[in-house]
Image: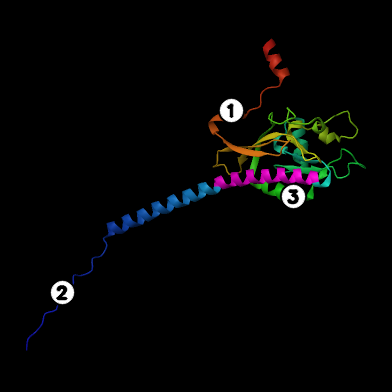
Amino acid sequence: MISRSHPRHPAPRCFTLIELLLTVALVLVLLGAVIYNFSSAASGARLNEGAGQVEALFRFARAHAESTGKQVRILFPESEGGDSAEMVAAESPASTVRVTWEADPVGAPGVFRDLPAAASYVQSISNLVSIQMVQPDGQGAEGTGVSADALPNAGSTEEPAAEAARNPFSIVTFYPDGTGDSVEVVLASRDEEDVRRLMVRMTGLTGIIRRHVIAEANAAELEPSAPATEAAAEGLK
């Protein structure tokens, strides 16, 4: 009887301990890179989303003023300074923006009340971004970016005392004719890891809104220039 020998199959090769450790280390490095990229994208998305919400609020306020025939104002409490800062903080605690409207221009002219329809914008913006600076946009047709009607008048009986004490550049007004104040708003993310700054610029006459990133190296340029009276005083020293 002829015996047939079966071919021997080589024994399966097992991974060594060093190979397993290297594999685990490589997987951990790749996983860390993915998590880092995801967190960076998420933090950057908050600032972009906040800027988008600010733009949407500008469009909403413009449309609401035009459709109702009543002025709408957007106030930026964080841009207030001096004596009015504490007052505004008490009126709008933890709020980045506040939206009011002249509910009864005939019976109560100059009296502005909170606009409930804008509550969702206010909440979303306050959660996502903070206001670094608000200033008039010189590109608007009105030149200063703030119309004469939006400037508070302390001697007027129609203007509430709270409005008269505010910094006029921290208020953006939209009018029934579809126009508004030209303004530049610099935003920062609530996420401390995102050091970018975004500027949202609105031209009041046309309603065109643009945004661009401000480099951190140029952050010093965001400081508002000293008033003319202070500059003159410095020159006399």
Q: Where is residue 64 shown, x and y percent of the image?
A: 78, 46
Calculate the distance from the C-alpha at mark 3 to the C-alpha at mark 2. Answer: 78 Å
Q: Is mark 2 on a helix, strand or loop?
A: loop
**Is 9 left or right of 64, judged from the image as shown?**
left
Q: Is residue 186 magenta?
A: no
Give the quadrant of residue 234: top right
Work out which residue is located at the far left of the displayed protein and give it.
1
Tell me if residue 153 comes above or below residue 92 in the rendering.
above
The local crowd at label 3, few if under 14, some if 14 to 19, many if 20 or more residues have their Cα within 10 Å, is few
Q: What element carries label 3?
A: helix
**Is 78 left or right of 103, judged from the image as shown?**
left
Q: What residue type is labelled 3?
A: Ala
Q: Which mark is first along the chain, 2 or 1?
A: 2
Q: What element carries label 1?
A: helix
Residue beneath the point at 82% across and 35% down: 163
Q: Which amino acid does label 1 sit on?
A: Ala
Q: Is the magenta stretch mostly helix, strand or loop?
A: helix
Q: Where is residue 152 shown, x and y percent of the image?
A: 82, 31
Q: Where is residue 221 shown, x and y percent of the image?
A: 60, 27
Q: Does the magenta stretch include residue 44?
A: yes
Q: Report the front residue among 3 and 174.
A: 174
Give the quadrant of residue 143: top right
Q: Which label is found at residue 220?
A: 1
Q: Name the residue under label 2.
A: 8
Q: Which label is found at residue 119?
A: 3
Q: Which region is colored magenta?
A: 43-66
The local crowd at label 1, few if under 14, some if 14 to 19, many if 20 or more residues have their Cα within 10 Å, is few
Q: From the image, which quarter does the N terminus lie in?
A: bottom left
**Is 35 left or right of 201, judged from the image as shown?**
left
